[in-house]
Amino acid sequence: MKCDPTQNLHRRSIRLSGYDYSRSGAYFITICTHNRFSLFGQITDGEMHLNDSGRMIERCWNEIPVHFPHVELDAFVVMPNHVHGIVAIADSPNPPRKPPITPIQPSGTSKTIGSIVRGFKIGVTTWMRQNTNVHDVWQRNYWERIIRNEPELNRIREYILNNPVNWDSDSLYVVNPQCNR
């Protein structure tokens, strides 16, 4: 079968068309494991028990502001096959008071939600490949919701914190053996 150059070969984006994802604000992020395998621990009696990989996930998440100083973290939970977290992008933490005499070279660190998630996924994947038999850690992409107001922020915080208790009814709940690949 010949390739048709007029055919769009890219997947449809799940991002809000035209939205600037470097814009200040809070974002609810969900990142799932590849094939929704339970890689990060297990839930017993409504409580998440992290394995070594799950503990590494927490460390990588908590280090996001080290790599992205314009980011503040809020509620977060590691589940057996996904993570939920709230990321808030602030305005530039230390804006320059006057223009520099010489142009500043780009640092290479984009301030978008996509670059934050990409950095997190790379850090976790690198550790997993070096310390476990797991090669494919994450599904392609991630889910995000732009948090529009304080009541919504509070509802999402509550959802995240109660996620382990409500695991059996979670849409991401999958019965699969504990993955020890």
Image (cartoon, grey):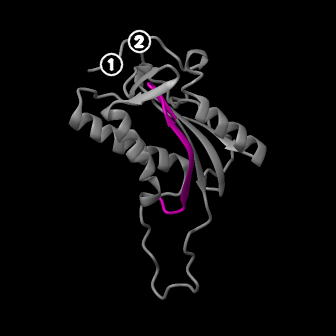
The front one of 77 and 31 is 77
Point out which mark residue 179 bears: 1
Please name the residue that numbered disc 2 is placed on: 176
The kind of secondary structure element at disc 2 is loop
Q: Quadrant of residue 154?
A: top right
Question: Residue 63: where, in percent of width, then height?
Answer: 41, 53
Compared to 180, does 123 lie above or below?
A: below
Q: Nearer the viewer, residue 135 or 37?
A: 37
For the question of whether residue 149 can be seen, the reply is: no
Residue sitting at the far front: 45
| Residue at point 74%, 41% (across, down) | 152
- Packing grade of label 2 (10 A; few <14, some 14-19, many >=20) is few
> Where is 18 relative to 52, above or below?
below
Quadrant where the C terminus is found in the figure: top left
Q: Is residue 128 visible from the viewing direction of this image?
A: yes
Q: Nearer the viewer, residue 178 or 140?
A: 178
Mark 2: amino acid = Asn
How far apart are the two marked residues, 2 and 1, measured between alpha carbons? 8 Å
CB-based contact (under 8 Å), mark 2 and mark 1? yes
Magenta span contains residue 23: no
Q: Main secondary structure of the magenta part?
A: strand
Read off the magenta span: 68-83
Picture coordinates of residue 108 (x, y %)? 42, 61
Magenta-drawn stretch contains 80: yes
